[in-house]
Image: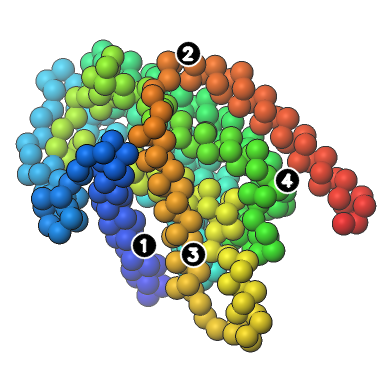
Amino acid sequence: MNWILKIIEIILIIIPILLSMAFLTLKERKVLANIQRRSGPNIVGIYGILQPFSDAIKLFLKETVIPSHANKIIYLITPIITLSLALISWSVIPFNNNIIIGDINLGLLYLLGISSLSVYGVLGSGWGSNSKYAFLGGLRSTAQMISYEVSMGLLLLSVLIWTGSYNLSVIVITQEEGWNLIGLLPTSILFLISILAETNRSPFDLPEGESELVSGFNVEYSSMTFALFFLGEYVHIILMSIIFTIIFLGGWTNVITDKYWNIIGLEDLDLGWLKSFNMSIKTSLIIYWFIWVRGSYPRFRYDQLMGLVWKNILPLSIGLIMWNGSIIIATNSLNW
């Protein structure tokens, strides 16, 4: 019976994630339209609110064309791997102090491991398509994701030193008196840049460079196979945004409202919905930042992209580990 309840819990979490992804595409198109001073989707439904469902129906109904020269097994399985890994990562995300599928002590390490496995979906799609454009896009994306995962791992090591735990729930609880953003501001800025590159978003969208690679690693995909890549990318954006919220913005905690409830004597009241709302607002702001960057900055050259991580972000990440470690040692020795 317990496994039935666990399946129901997983379904109740996955469905809102997929719906959020659908409306994220609408939000992105609306925000980009405002940045570029034009009208976004406004025909299908009131203010274009049904546009994501129209796009989904179109992709479902289109014919799936499999190239004759492709390795069909790899070609078909890689989109499924991409979306599956994006969804599996959500199993350790705490939405509030009560809603979490798997509250494991190595949550950060688990997320890094799943993130590293997502490289296989991108590389497999480029290889399985047996196309020069797709292959080059897959190689670009693999090199980019592996490079920025190194910097992300080091930046998360700074968070580990600061909070003393890999458990995401514990990391949130340690921020009840103040967000890590305040003490780890340089680390948070570098982490924001790294998650942009990790999700292949502009200005780091070199693997999907339309001007030189047509569409990169997914150029040979159509209909639902393309939709799975599309779903995986946007689910990954929401995931990275909520990870940033948990690590640096206190997750579901809100210092002002939490103290207010304590003052009026309602600290024992179950406010799970309010905590989830706090978390969703912070995550939405980070997602908006993703979109704003896309509408504001041009694409990097590939040598600039790789030089940024190996010559700038990586040395700074190592320096921040030493700096944060020194602060922790100093405060512990002085008993602050």
Q: Position of residue 40 (x, y in %)?
A: 20, 44
Q: Is residue 86 above or below residue 267?
A: above
Which residue of the protein is positioned furthest toward the right in this rendering?
A: 334
Answer whether labels 1 and 2 touch (C-beta < 8 Å). no
The quarter of the image holding the C terminus is bottom right
Amino acid residing under circle 2: Asp
Circle 4 Cα neighbour tier, 10 Å, few/some/many (<14 / 14–19 / ≥20): some
Q: Quadrant of residue 228?
A: top left
Q: Earlier in the sequence, mark 4 or mark 1?
A: 1
Q: Position of residue 144 (x, y in %)?
A: 46, 24
Mark 4 sits on what residue?
161
- At numbered mark 2, what does the secondary structure look like: helix, strand or loop? helix
Q: Is residue 5 above or below residue 74?
A: below
Q: What is the number of the mark on residue 13?
A: 1
Amino acid residing under circle 1: Ile
CA gap, disc 4 and disc 2: 32 Å
Mark 2 sits on what residue?
303
Q: Nearer the viewer, residue 113 or 187?
A: 187
Q: Is residue 180 left or right of residue 7?
A: right
Give the label, 1 or 2, closer to the camera: 2
- At numbered mark 4, what does the secondary structure look like: helix, strand or loop? helix
